[in-house]
Amino acid sequence: MPDTEKELVERWLRGDKNAFGALVRRFMSDAYLIALGFAGNSEDARDLSQEAFIKAYAAREQFDRDRPFYPWFYRILRNRCLNFIQRESKKHESLFYDNDPDRERFASPSPSILESLEREERVRLVHAAIERLSFDHREVIVLKNLKGYSYEQIARTLGIPIGTVMSRLYYARKMLKEILTEMEQRGVAETPNLVPGARTAPGEVV
Amino acid sequence: MVCERFQAEGMRLLDDELSVEDKKQYEEHVKNCADCRRELKEIGRVVELTNDLKLRAPDEEFWARYWDSLFHRLERGTGFVLMIAGILVVLAYAVYEAVTSPEFFTVKGISIAVILLGLVVVFLSVVRERYHESKSDPYKGVKQ
């Protein structure tokens, strides 16, 4: 029978490196994919998630053994991603427009080339819009839509009430809608109507 | 004006987190609520667009390499700490030997001392710069 998270943590805190390895294997997929949602390319996502594990390993003295491992680890990962975004935003206007060596990061089961190209452009636009959100709003979008967490999982991971998750997600989506509308009105790209009402004149009834 | 039921139930409906019974009740409400219908249409489109962004999970080979490289990075980290500790001990011993040596106040001794002093100044300057950077970091308040 596989060890529980608590047993692994206890063994790791007693100095068992193999137990830490088992914890890494248990959470590496989540860590990598969340970092990919923030960073936008697999190389940086791998580095950020690995750095978070290394930092967690080094900071084990600070770990409260009465609390679950993942939310604690997530906070380390989150800070790494936050610093990365802050650093990168000084170098590039947009991670997804200017620094996009890994365009294969999204699954793309499109039936035709044209649809595939349209979808790719739409995905790039939506990602560029997500980048313009505040970190808190971006975080809930990454966890909910890119990673597929439930409200409860997000609440547990972030250590906040479900009501706050829903409210944060609501305002993130409202903001995203405004950004997408603005991008479309500025003609950032020749794309199909992304948001209902985006191409109507101010005050026009939809 | 936004109907207060949208944030509580409309969001759950869009994210498929509403029970069958609650879903029925809310759909009845939506029939008579223009605010909810508008929000469902607008926010629903955003949800649709973002749901389209599923990340591609890497293959088995990637995960095998992932753990190997993480393990090596952990090992290198331990090695780096040991190396720095060793260098500091050697440096401290060298300073002690130099200061207690009768040749310390010769041209050779003073030249070496000046070089070492320069290194210390450079090191302290870097530390000071990093300290000031961290003080002005807008995200430093974010808890771990």
Image (spheres, rainbow, N blue to C red):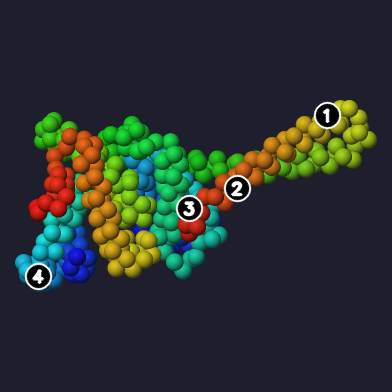
Q: Are the residues tagged 4 and 3 within 8 Å (C-beta)?
A: no
Could you tell me if residue B66 is visible in this image? no
> Which residue occupies 41% across, 55% down?
A74
Q: Position of residue A157 (x, y in %)?
A: 36, 60
Q: How far apart are the alpha carbons under marks 1 and 2?
A: 32 Å
Label 4 chain ID = B
- Disc sitting over residue B132 in the figure: 2
3D distance between C-alphas at marks 4 and 3: 43 Å
Q: In the image shown, does B80 or B37 lie closer to the viewer?
A: B37
Residue at mark 3: chain: B
> Which residue sits at x=14%, y=49%?
A197
Which residue in the structure is indicated by mark 1?
B111
Confirm or deny contact between disc 3 and disc 1 (CB under 8 A). no
Residue A21 vs residue A175, the one in the foreground: A175
- Disc 2 element: helix
Residue holding disc 3: B139
Kindly report the distance in space between the C-alpha atoms of the residues bearing marks 3 and 1: 44 Å
Same chain for labels 4 and 1? Say yes or no.
yes
Marks 4/2: CA–CA distance = 56 Å
Write down the residue under mark 4: B29
Task: Say whether disc 1 or disc 2 marks the residue closer to the N-terminus.
Answer: 1
Q: CA distance from mark 3 to mark 2?
A: 14 Å
Q: Hey, what amino acid is under mark 1?
A: Ser
Q: Residues within 10 Å of mark 2 (few under 14, many from 20)?
A: few
Q: Which residue corresponds to the image point at 20% horizontal and 53% vertical from the top-left?
A: B47
Dot 4 falls on a residue whose secondary structure is: helix
Compared to residue A4, the image places residue B108 above or below, namely above
- Is B124 above or below relative to B23? above
Indicate the position of residue B71 as horizontal and vertical percent values.
48, 43
- Mark found first going from the N terminus, 4 or 1: 4
Q: Are marks 1 and 2 in contact (CB under 8 Å)?
A: no
